[in-house]
């Protein structure tokens, strides 16, 4: 089975992502598990995720959110994930997403589903937790440096950076790459979706994705290549 990942930065890439993600999830017959961080009035954010799916005939989607106290009904979430034909992890506070979905037992369940051919899409926080190395930028933590954690492990040997047009996205990515001795990074623009199959980058959708290759870890020299979407 092919493990397909659709990693995007923001809502500007929703439509381009849905054009590829929904067919991979089963088209109009898809059942999508939408993993969110919860919080007050979380329901009002659902529409922005599902509208592109509704336009493509999808009628079955289920939001997975924590309770008011921040804890998750793990059994109910696992049931939804095992029944889903596609998994979409939303954006927001990356440490919260990491705590909810990139730890056991859901970490293993998501990994198993992807290995079974169920496509995974992650926006912003959902993209950052997808690799083996989860590099959480200071904007999400209030810390001075990038926070490194173990992600879902759906891709290995790379660092993912979202909102790549932001002023410090590249320095933070290089910091994470140097600390982990990881030679490859992928920077995703806000209007872009990076598509991976079985751990390999395949194409960009919507906007540009940037491949960063570290050439010297000690002084952080690198090469950067823009991967544009096919027209």
Image (tube, helix red, strand yellow):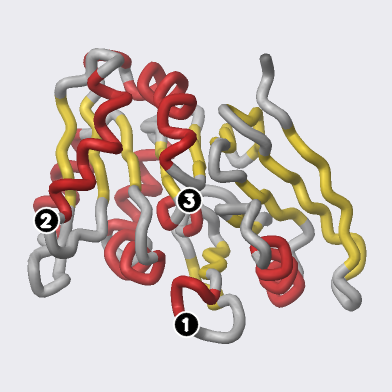
Q: Nearer the viewer, residue 65 or 41?
A: 41
- In this rendering, position of residue 150 left or right of residue 186: left
Q: Rounded to the nearest whole Å, what is the CA distance between mark 2 and mark 1?
A: 32 Å
Q: Nearer the viewer, residue 69 or 100?
A: 69
Q: Secondary structure at mark 1?
A: loop
Q: How many marks?
A: 3
Label 2 Cα crowd, 10 Å radius (few <14 / some 14-19 / many 20+): few
| Image coords of residue 137 (percent x, y) | 55, 70
| Image coords of residue 196 (percent x, y) | 58, 36
Pointer 3 residue = 127
- In this rendering, position of residue 17 left or right of residue 214: left
Which residue: 27% across, 17% down?
Answer: 55
Ranked by sequence position, the earlier of labels 1 and 3 is 3
Pointer 2 residue = 75
Pointer 1 residue = 142
Q: Which residue of the protein is positioned furthest toward the bottom in this rendering?
A: 144
Ranked by sequence position, the earlier of labels 2 and 1 is 2
């Amino acid at each position: 089975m092919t493990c397909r990942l659709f990693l995007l930065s923001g809502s500007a890439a929703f439509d381009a992502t849905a054009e590829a993600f929904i067919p991979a999830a089963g088209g109009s017959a898809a059942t999508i598990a939408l993993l969110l961080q919860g919080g007050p009035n979380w329901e009002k954010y659902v529409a922005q995720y599902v509208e592109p799916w509704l336009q493509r005939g999808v009628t079955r989607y289920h939001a997975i959110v924590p309770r008011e106290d921040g804890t998750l009904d793990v059994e109910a979430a696992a049931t939804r994930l095992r029944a889903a034909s596609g998994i979409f992890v939303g954006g927001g506070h990356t440490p919260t997403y990491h705590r909810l979905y990139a730890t056991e037992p859901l970490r293993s369940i998501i990994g198993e589903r992807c290995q079974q051919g169920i496509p995974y899409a992650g926006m912003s926080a959902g993209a950052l937790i997808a690799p083996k190395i989860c590099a959480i930028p200071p904007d999400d933590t209030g810390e001075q440096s990038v926070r490194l954690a173990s992600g879902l492990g759906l891709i290995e040997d790379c660092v993912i950076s979202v909102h790549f047009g932001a002023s410090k996205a590249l320095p933070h990515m290089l910091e994470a790459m140097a600390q982990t001795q990881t030679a490859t990074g992928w920077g995703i623009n806000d209007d872009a979706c990076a598509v991976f199959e079985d751990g390999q980058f395949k194409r960009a959708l919507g906007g540009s994705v940037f491949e960063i290759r570290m050439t010297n870890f000690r002084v952080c020299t690198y090469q950067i290549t823009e991967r544009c979407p096919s027209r």
